[in-house]
Image (cartoon, rainbow, N blue to C red):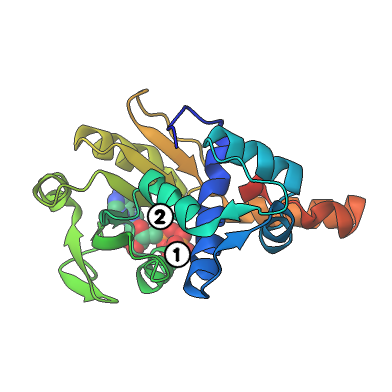
């Protein structure tokens, strides 16, 4: 299957497809129809067919898609073979929760280092992850070849820490703070504003009821 440039919305759905195909494959299923997939992942089947056509995967009428070949393709595309070490900055409530969670359901990413300005937490191990003082951040990131980071520092420190991350050569920042940080075009930021997501859900419930909310922002 050809690896063409795919739309961002399609790329966002890739992990969702991947997870479900993995379940099907482990259950010994050889093929799946777009209707079945649609029900399982809550994406309409026309969108699934369009998404899959970008990957060069054309389902056969009456047969559906071959689970194994789709899975292999997604695996390659998502780089599931490679373990990516990620660092977390700011071991507060949210930072602690993420360290403890540590993306255990995937075997491709894990938080392998954390950093905090607080001397009480620096040089300790939290949920199996070493926490280093901020003074060692640049050196450790480079030493451990980490270029993806999770930002869970307070709002007022977010930009300053983001600048430090950029200076350390980081390529991606998952920003859990509610502010939009500025970074050079060479660095990618993914914003995850949990309070905003929750408020959006409540807004939709209040204004449109439960039906219109079946659409998930991760699927947009
Ligand atoms: P959360 O916002 O995750 O609920 P919290 O309320 O427990 O956290 P915050 O004050 O938001 O605590 O700080 C989160 C963590 O970020 C704390 O552990 C704090 O020591 C750390 N922190 C604060 N400023 C910086 C900084 N400039 N660089 C690195 N870490 C910092």
Q: Name the residue under label 2.
A: 152
Task: Decide: is 28 above or below 38.
Answer: below
Distance from disc 1 to disc 2, alpha carbons, whole Å, reads 7 Å
Q: Name the residue under label 1.
A: 94
For label 1, the SS is helix
Question: Would the CB of label 1 be found within 8 Å of ligand 1?
Answer: yes
Specify the farthest residue to the top: 185
Point out residue 142 in the picture as x, y percentages from the top left corner: 12, 44
For label 2, the SS is loop
* Crowd class of label 1 (few under 14; some 14 to 19; many from 20; radius 10 Å): some
Task: Decide: is 214 above or below 45.
Answer: below
Q: Give the image quadrant in which the ligand numbered 1 is located.
A: bottom left
| Of 132 and 14, the residue lying toward us | 14
Q: Do the residues labelled 1 and 2 touch (CB within 8 Å)?
A: yes
Task: Decide: is 170 above or below 82.
Answer: above
Can residue 178 be spotted in the picture? no
Question: Would the CB of label 2 be found within 8 Å of ligand 1?
Answer: yes
């Amino acid at each position: 299957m050809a690896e063409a440039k795919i739309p961002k919305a399609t790329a966002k759905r890739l992990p969702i497809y991947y997870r479900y195909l993995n379940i099907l494959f482990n259950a010994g299923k050889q093929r799946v129809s777009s209707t079945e997939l649609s029900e399982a992942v809550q994406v309409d089947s026309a969108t699934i067919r369009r998404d899959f056509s970008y990957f060069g995967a054309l389902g056969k009428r009456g047969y559906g898609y071959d689970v194994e070949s789709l899975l292999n393709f997604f695996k390659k595309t998502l780089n599931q073979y490679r373990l990516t070490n990620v660092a977390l900055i700011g071991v507060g409530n949210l930072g602690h929760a993420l360290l403890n969670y540590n993306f255990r359901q995937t075997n491709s990413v894990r938080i392998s280092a954390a950093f905090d300005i607080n001397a009480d937490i620096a040089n300790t191990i939290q949920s199996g992850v070493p926490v280093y003082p901020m003074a060692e951040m640049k050196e450790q990131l480079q030493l451990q070849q980490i270029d993806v980071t999770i930002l869970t520092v307070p709002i007022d420190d977010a930009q300053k820490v983001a600048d430090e991350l950029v200076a350390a050569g980081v390529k991606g920042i998952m920003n859990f703070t509610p502010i939009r940080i500025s970074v050079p075009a060479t660095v990618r930021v993914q914003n995850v504003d949990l309070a905003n997501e929750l408020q959006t859900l409540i807004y939709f419930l209040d204004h449109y009821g439960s039906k219109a909310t079946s659409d998930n922002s991760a699927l947009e």
